[in-house]
Amino acid sequence: MTVKGKSIGLRSLRDWDSIPSGLATIVASTASLGNWVTGEAIERSDGVMDLSSTRVFVTDGFWRKTLAAVRALGRAGVRVTVGESTYLAPAFFSRYCHARVRIPSPVLQPQDYLDFLEDYLNRHPHEVLLPMEEATLLLLARYHDRFERLTRLPTSDYQTLELTGDKLQVLQRADALSIPIPQTYPVPDLETGQILLDTLPYPLVVKPRLGSGSAGVEYVTERAQLLPALRRAFAAGHRPLIQERLPADGQGIGVCLLLDRSQQVRASFVHRRLREYPITGGPSTLRESCRHEQAYTDAVRLLQDLRFVGVAMVEFKIDARTGQAKLLEVNPRF
């Protein structure tokens, strides 16, 4: 792992199999959090920031990645408040959770969520607001103006997050930067799919332009399967794209980055996938730290070109035919 240009040894991510980005501990580093907090974080004589007076509100306490972030921040001395719509949130039970707040659901009650959170932060000041789930991140970014006088939100603006979450637009930007990508075909309608039917290099992947994980992803091994897969995608309300399916023996590589408002890398972490669920392709369930210079360099170039701010995981897969790491998508969140 690299923090502010320094290489730091870490145990294998086998110990952290519930952390999708591998950046939970990095957020607690003075090089990272100190970049967002001014006034409250005081540098000690040994050059380390004293974060004991810093308060961070962490959202989405139900998720294991949130628990990992709460532990990391708490161990760094930060006073952590956790928000969630249920009292059964695991992060509520962490010894490092200083305050627990039951809050409306950002998915089911977005307006109530915004009103409650704005009122809470007005009455209980926090230096940083850290959204963990994508729905929460997008909601807070869209209404950033309601919170900018109350706290610091270390994320990109809403338009950049939308762009970064669109697989097709990201792949097109990457291609323009000469970053390797799988062969990719936009499919605005079924008629386009019909035209492409006999020209595509099977096997293929049909996936939504928006979304993460394996939701909406279908694998097509022969011509007869393509149009039915596209029909299902359109019926579900997706805007699909078609990609060549890279050889299965190519390893997945994830590059996790934290960029400041000048698009400088404040922290980074690279891992390789060992297992995923479902085994045909989906979120990884076991991974370990590694080095991959091409993937790291391409990930940094891409996020800087997108003018991205905050935490992201850039996903690659090794093309076993060429040895290149080819970009699949960017997850603009933990």
Image (cartoon, grey):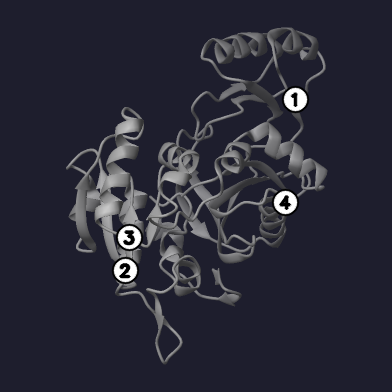
Tell me if label 2 and label 3 are in contact, CB under 8 Å: no
In the rendered image, residue 64, in percent from the top left (x then y), is placed at 32, 49
In the rendered image, residue 69, in percent from the top left (x then y), is placed at 36, 58
Residue 207, by quadrant, is: top right
The tag earlier along the polypeptide, 4 or 1, is 1
Query: Pointer 1: what residue?
Result: 185
The tag earlier along the polypeptide, 4 or 2, is 2
Q: Is residue 129 above or below residue 52?
A: above
Secondary structure under badge 4? helix
Secondary structure under badge 1? strand
In the rendered image, residue 9, in percent from the top left (x then y), is placed at 50, 74
User: Is residue 254 shown to the viewer in this render?
Assistant: yes
Tell me the residue at 73%/12% (across/down): 193
> As drawn, is 262 to the left or to the right of 12?
right
In the rendered image, residue 31, in percent from the top left (x then y), is placed at 50, 73
CA separation in Å, label 4 and label 2: 32 Å
Q: Residues within 10 Å of mark 3 (few under 14, many from 20)?
A: many
On-image quarter of the N terminus: bottom right
Tell me if label 4 and label 2 are in contact, CB under 8 Å: no
Q: Amino acid at mark 2?
A: Val
Secondary structure under badge 3? loop
The tag earlier along the polypeptide, 2 or 3, is 2
Query: Pointer 2: what residue?
Result: 78
Query: Pointer 4: what residue?
Result: 305
CA separation in Å, label 1 and label 2: 46 Å
The tag earlier along the polypeptide, 1 or 2, is 2
